[in-house]
Amino acid sequence: MDYVILFLFIGCAAFLGAMIGLGIAFGFFLYFSIIILIYISWWKIFEKAGRKGWAALIPFYNTYKLIKIAGRSGWWFFLLFIPMVNVVVII
C-alpha cells in the first residue's frame, strides 16, 4: 500500500515538474516573440522615416537616430541621461 502512494506521489511530482517546464518554455517563447515583433516594428519605423532599418537594432544609436528623426539636435540624446530632464526630453 505504501508503495502505491509513493508511486502516485512521484508520478504527480514528475507531472508537475513537466508542467512547470512547459510553462517556462512557453514564457521564453512568448518573450522572444514579443522582442522580435518589437525589432520588426522599429525596423519599419526607421524605413518609413527614410533611415536604414539596421540602425534600429543597435542600442543607443537607435535612440540617437530617433531623436534626429523627431527633428531635434543630437545633444538631446545626452539629456536622456539626466534624471527628471529625460522625462521632458521623451515627451
Image: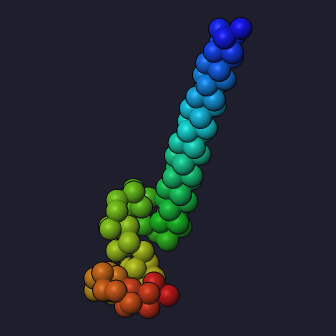
Q: Nearer the viewer, residue 11 or 69?
A: 11
Q: In this rendering, would 43 be left or right of 64?
A: right
Residue 67 % position (x, y): 40, 79
Q: Which residue lies furthest to the front in this view?
A: 1
Residue 29 % position (x, y): 56, 40
Is residue 72 visible in the rendered image? The answer is no
* Residue name at image x 34 percent, y 59 percent: 58
Q: In this view, does 73 lie above or below 12?
A: below
* Residue name at image x 49 percent, y 71 percent: 49
Q: In this view, does 86 lie above or below 27?
A: below
Rendering quarter of residue 16: top right
Q: Nearer the viewer, residue 3 or 90?
A: 3
Tell me the quadrant of the picture where the N terminus can be found: top right
Q: Which of 12 and 68 is in front in this view?
A: 12
Q: How is the image coloured?
A: rainbow
Rendering quarter of residue 55: bottom left
Q: In this view, does 82 lie above or below 30?
A: below
Count of picture labels: 0
* Residue name at image x 60 percent, y 22 percent: 14
Residue 44 % position (x, y): 54, 60
Q: Which of 32 and 37 is in front in this view?
A: 32
Is residue 53 visible in the rendered image? The answer is yes
